[in-house]
Amino acid sequence: MIEKLNEIRRQLTELLAKEDVDEKTLEELRIRFLGKKGELTAVLRGMGSLPPEERPKVGQYANELREEFERMLEEKGAALRERARQEKLERERIDVTAPGRTPKIGRRHPLESTRIEMCEIFRSMGFDIVEGPEVEYAYYNFDALNTPENHPSRDLTDTFYITENILLRTQTSPVQVRTMEQRKPPIKIVAPGRVYRSDEVDATHSPLFHQLEGLVVDKHITMGDLKGVLELFAQKMFGPGSRIRFRPHHFPFTEPSAEVDVSCFVCGGKGCRVCKGEGWIEILGSGVVHPNVLRAGGIDPNIYSGFAFGMGIERIAMIRYGIDDMRLLYENDIRFLAQF
Ligand code: DAH
């Protein structure tokens, strides 16, 4: 019987040594040699025919063999798994020293970075940033801003009307009265956003563009405060050497009113191609808030005064980056945008 057990052992050893043993054949061998109907069990079943004194010896040997078989199968299994792992590593080998492919990262649109920078400058001076609706009542866009019925800006050909009373705002100035309705002085806000005018597209016009409105209301606010704020803004936006100049103008919602120019950042005021020989570039409209506008906002003009300004963000971006055609800002040509 010992003979027979040794024969089984020899068989298993031989089979395991074969080249083509894989996980599947390993499992088959396990069943064939160690299973309930396997070779080892079959031998043990025949133990009954042995003389009683031999049984313990054979039984012990059979048990030793069982353990040995299990170990052999286990070792073979481990070897197979290790080989598979090595093959996988080899297959998936990567060269970590190879130069990488730089991922393409997008960047901010120059108009957006300009808006952010403008807001940051005013924030540093203590202004809050607020917003108003782009679809606006004619009341806030015109009437509350002291704009007479017959004012040219109300013309149907200049303004996108939705109904007689509702329109796409033509300026960010309506945010002035909306803010006064919601806050008590001191008020110190800027309001960036889109505005709409029925203009043909060309190098300096677009039916949709962006403005940044500013409003300060408190006791004793004067034109001097306006000048100080705008001067600081110009220096932070266009460099410490920048100067500004005020030109008298007319807006219904301010009195007095002024247009403001900044000294050309390219030639410093001598006159060049960018400023068209002027030395100055117009950047905004401004003035001392008209008493009627304060009243429309529920603020007593005998106690409070204020200043306001509105500037085009495209205009600022174009000056800032030396862009000579506004359309470039809207066409989303990657070759253009990648330069900023
Ligand atoms: N809203 C004016 C425009 O669109 C710009 C402007 C001028 C805004 C004077 C103001 C201001 O707040 O006081 O042309």
Image: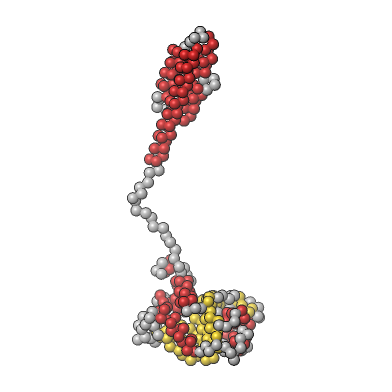
- x and y, in percent, of residue 35 in the image: 52, 22
Say which of 223 and 332 sits in front: 223
Residue 45, quarter of the rendered image: top right
Quick check: can you spot residue 66? yes
Q: How is the image coloured?
A: secondary structure
Image coordinates for residue 230, horizontal then vertical, percent: 46, 83
Q: Give whichever of 319, 36 is nearer the camera.
A: 36
Q: Residue furthest right?
A: 164
Instruction: Residue at 52%, 86% (x, y): give it.
Output: 307
Residue 181, placed above or below residue 336 = below
Tally of numbered discs: 0
Q: Residue at x 51, y 83 (%)?
A: 309
Considering every residue shown, the one lying at the far top of the view is: 51
Hey, which quadrant is residue 274 in on the image? Answer: bottom left
- Please tell me which residue is depicted at 59% across the width and 87% down the height of the picture: 294
- Residue 159 visible? The answer is no
Task: Give percent across and percent down for residue 303.
Answer: 58, 90
- Locate the C terminus and report the quarter of the image it occupies: bottom left
Q: Residue at x 65, y 78 (%)?
A: 163
